[in-house]
Amino acid sequence: MPSPLVRVASLLVACLLVVSPARGDDWPQWRGPNRDGVWRETGLRTALPAEGIATKWRAEVGGGYGGPAVAGDKVYLMDYVTDGPVTNDPSQRTELSGKERVLCFDAATGKPLWTHAYDCPYAISYACGPRCTPTVVDGKVFTLGAEGHLHCLDAATGKVLWKRHFPADYGTKTPIWGYAGHPLVEGNLVVCMVGGEGSAVVAFDRDTGKEVWRSLQASEPGYAPPSILEQAGKRRLLTWDADTIAALDPATGKPAWTVPLKPGYGMSIMAPQVAESGSGRVLFASGIGNIGALYRFPEAGGGAPEPVWRNRAKASIASANSTPVILGDVLYGCDCETGFLTAVDLETGDRLWETGVPTLGSRRGRHGTAFLVREGATDRFWLFSETGDLILARLTPQAYEELGRVNLLAPTGECFGREVVWTHPAFAGKHVFARNDKELVCVPLAADAGR
């Protein structure tokens, strides 16, 4: 009979086998499990080899700006297939006939598992495809297409469980650049930026699709996704439509507070960022037209934050495609006017440094874009550039320090006369999953993966 010590050791081993994950972390929605743009896995590469990294698999896909989601052993993605020519004009809608699709792939091999497709005429600017990353929760996939088709699908089979269509259901017109606010699951609710009379924000029952509440009046729903705010011991929905930043009661949609912030052309795009800084708890939001501000929350209570400073010429950043990151007393993000990745002093709004190396490369232009994902609690960031390069870099108040880059994809889109890929990647199971308008790729990033 085993000794007590042996029995205890065996029990500990068994417990570890039960609680230790058999695979890496998921990336089941836009910007990761917590929507905070942090990749919490360990054992990752500390540099990227100049000779590149072998792609694990490639899968053919259609057009789109929405990134992939990874949950369990599957990858989910939206795309658009059309026979018509896609021409980009920022001020004109392109009319196309085609199908939006929700695609499901095996995460290990890239093998297609199922497809859900539906007819979807487009009348939007930059009409290559959907903008939203799928949200995967408890065996369900929630997707929002560019023309306002919200679907709830069975994650295993792609079967439609329920669906809504915002223009038909709420009498709203699709924004000129399409619906772009990634659906948020909060408890038993799916929260979306919708538009229409008194329905800038709508919460649906996630099991049935029935409306639970609607809230706020806005000139347009904007393009920013809803997120979660913890304030004074209460959980709030944080939203930004084309006119107003608001904190809402998740159960009722009743506003706890609102602050006006109206970017140019209704282009509220980034998710407002909340963080602890040396001067207290702050909120930052900005958009095109150099519109934006840093706000400070009251020390006690759940009241509205007060402005600390507002954007000014050649200071701060006007963020658009890419949501910035607050780290300590510094804000890092892409300025849509200069096209540069920029570091900003949170206390003053002054720029500490700026560089086009990770966004535009040797090119110049507006809306230079890199999507920022922080590695754990470090100052290391994984950046996916509009050039199609994955970049590992250290961001500090003093400088941008590049630790290496590899090319993942060709930039197949177009913006202002240059080729771009504007899609947020997913980081899961020590791999990166990224797409352009032709293919989805999976590339290993584990420290022991080799080339």
Image: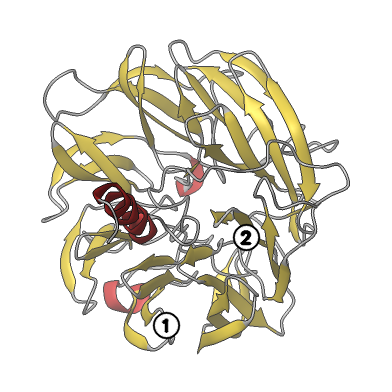
- Which residue shows up at 44% across the image and 85% down it? 158
Q: Which mark is residue 423?
A: none
Describe residue 34's horizontal placement relative to residue 259 as left or right. right
Which quadrant would residue 382 be assigned to in this image? top right
Dot 1 and dot 2 residues touching (CB under 8 Å): no
Q: Nearer the viewer, residue 350 or 377?
A: 377
- Split into 4 quadrants, where in the image is the N terminus? bottom left
Secondary structure beneath label 1: loop
Image location of residue 23, percent across then percent down? 49, 61
Image location of residue 412, percent across then percent down? 77, 62
The residue carrying pointer 2 sits among few (fewer than 14), some (14 to 19) or many (20 or more) residues within 10 Å by Cα, namely many
Residue 421's place in the image compared with 5, above or below, is below
- Which residue shows up at 80% across the image and 59% down it? 54
Q: Nearer the viewer, residue 20 or 6?
A: 6
For the image shown, how many numbered marks are present on the structure? 2
Residue placed farthest to the front in the image? Answer: 1
**Which residue is tagged 2?**
433
**Which residue is tagged 1?**
156
Residue placed farthest to the right in the image? Answer: 51
Query: Is tag 1's residue or tag 2's residue first in the polypeptide sequence?
Result: 1
* Residue type of the residue flagged with mark 1: Ala
Which quadrant would residue 84 be assigned to in this image? bottom right
Q: Nearer the viewer, residue 8 or 87?
A: 8
Describe residue 181's horizontal placement relative to residue 365 as left or right. left
Q: Is residue 334 visible?
A: no
* Residue type of the residue flagged with mark 2: Phe
